[in-house]
Amino acid sequence: MDQLMGILLVAYLVFQMVRYWLDFMNISYMKKHGTKVPEGFEGHIDETLLRKTHAYAIEHNTFSLIESAFSSVMTIVFLYGGLLGLYASWVSSFANPFILQGTVFFLLLSYANSLLNIPFSLYHTFRIENKYGFNTMTAKLWVTDFVKSALISTVMTVIVCVCGLWIVQMSPDLWWLFVWGFFFIFSIFLMYISPYVIEPLFNKFTPLEGDGLEHKIRAMMQETGIRISRVFKVDASKRSHHTNAYFTGIGRTKRIVLYDTLLSKMDEDEVLAVLAHEAGHWKKRHLLKMILISEVLSFAVVYIAFRMLKNGIPAKVFGLGGSTFFAELVILGFVFSIVSFPLTPLLSALSRRHEREADRFAVELTPRPDALATSLIKLSKDNLSNLHPHPLYAAIYYSHPPVVARVRSIHEMAGNRQ
């Protein structure tokens, strides 16, 4: 068992080294090509802005590398330094009932993780984002957001632990099936209530009523067969200058949310093009397809976890004794993070395919075919997006096609339409 424990450690280290190698390769590629204005971006982006983009991307990626390395070290120390077993024994010493013990176990772990992430969050928000003109958040708002997030996380963790562990306790042989079903239903429930309960805790949503843009949005969505309940503007600018727009809601009726930063930087045709792209995702059932894939994978993972737990494999491999069920779940999470890595490029490729389909849908729907391309150029400009990612890095990690290739493809689609 010690040998298998060592194999897992080597596999984790190799997995991390591959990730870091890809990050370093991407940064090096960016340094080599990052100051060249890409074809199709002339007149929109100059060399001065590219140098700023280049500097932001490098600093942001370097910071992410440091954060990831710290997380990896803490994971290894916790699992291989004997701290997991000590922690599990300590929790079991004062929380005896099974459900209470598990809830306390995972709650305290989540609190520890949040506390360890505080320095990184502060540095990223008030150093990097400030330096490049994105951050508009005050220290008071950061603290308020942190407290709200902690409270919401606590409520969610308690609900999931109490319900999940009750199922485990009541059905020792079939809990894996019922837990999988519970998580599926709970995730769908959260998708329903989040726009009405959780999101308003952080932002103010104002109806876009009486605006000419709202009528154009409704007319375009009616043409696609999508029913819109409300169109909202959200005060995202109180935290950041980054831009975005999204749909919320499950089923036939949707809510559209537009960042106020987006509305201030794009013309109406470009806003319509961005929303047409989102409509393309709904019409092509991309969300449903990704949910189905996710649930199939989750089903397999939960069943494999059940079989391994039933045989006590994680406890044997890591030499755990006493009350180990919750510690074994942590170990399984560690193992699955390693074995799932090969799925990353496959899921990324599928996501990029969905994005291209949504782009085509938007080009065919909007009155100005090239509006989506100009909106993407503005988004990449305003967000200082990396215009020169390494092709291998993009193939593995990018859920969207690289923006330069994407803009080129949209122009080709628009040309064919004309």
Image: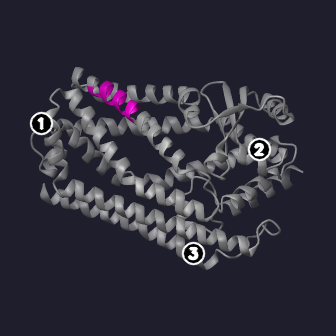
Per the rendered image, the range of residues in magenta is 154-165
Which residue lies under the disc numbered 2?
362
- Give amino acid for label 1: Ser
Q: Is residue 107 left or right of residue 192?
A: left
Q: Residue at x 75, y 57 (%)?
A: 378
Furthest residue in direction top, as rendered: 170
- In the image, residue 334 lies at what x, y percent? 30, 50
- Give amino acid for label 2: Ala
- Is residue 397 in sight in this rendering? no
Furthest residue in direction front, as rendered: 140
Question: Image height check: is 23 above or below 272?
Answer: below
Q: Is residue 393 left or right of residue 147?
A: right
366 or 386: nearer the eye? Answer: 386
- Name the quadrant containing residue 99: top left
SS of the residue under disc 2: helix
Give the numbered dot on residue 345: none
The first of marks 3 and 2 along the sequence is: 3
Question: What is the distance, in whole Å, between disc 1 and disc 3 at their CAs?
Answer: 53 Å
The first of marks 1 and 3 along the sequence is: 3
Which residue lies under the disc numbered 3?
29
Which residue lies under the disc numbered 1?
93
The first of marks 1 and 2 along the sequence is: 1
- Give amino acid for label 3: Tyr
Q: How many marks?
A: 3
Q: Residue at x 21, y 42 (%)?
A: 327
352 or 226: nearer the eye? Answer: 226
- In the image, residue 375 lies at what x, y percent? 77, 53
- In the image, residue 140 lies at what x, y percent? 52, 46
